[in-house]
Amino acid sequence: MRDHGHLRQEDMALLTGLSQAFLSLLESGQRRLTNIDRIIVLLDGLNAPIDVTGPMLRPAPITPDLPLLAAS
């Protein structure tokens, strides 16, 4: 994703809230991203589309409640 967006690790850190050092460790394979909360932070920071991430890793959009209709 970083290469595709022509981003530096520092840019990714600003977008995701994850540290540049942590991102460097991820890219080098020295660390793994196993914490689902951190994965979601990363995906949200990158504004990754659902078709890339899958719907289970993305929060559901908030929709307004529809008015209830009384049955007659």
Image (cartoon, rainbow, N blue to C red):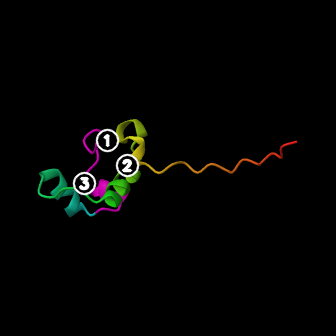
- Considering only vertical position in the picture, is 63 above or below 20? above
Q: Inspect the image, locate mark 3, and give the three-letter code of the amino acid beneath it.
A: Gln
C-beta proximity under 8 Å, tags 3 and 2: no
Asked if residue 49 shows in the view, the reply is no
In depth, the one of 28 and 52 nearer the eye is 52
- Magenta stretch in the rendered image: 1-18
What residue type is disc 1 on? Gly
Q: Amino acid at mark 2?
A: Leu
Point out the image quarter for the N terminus.
Answer: top left
- How far apart marks 3 and 1 lie (CA) works out to 11 Å
Pointer 1 residue? 5
User: How far across and how far down the image is residue 49, in percent?
Assistant: 41, 40
The residue closer to the viewer here, 69 or 47, is 69
Residue 37 is covered by the magenta coloring:
no
The numbered mark at residue 46 is 2
Magenta highlight on residue 17 = yes
Identify residue for label 3: 9
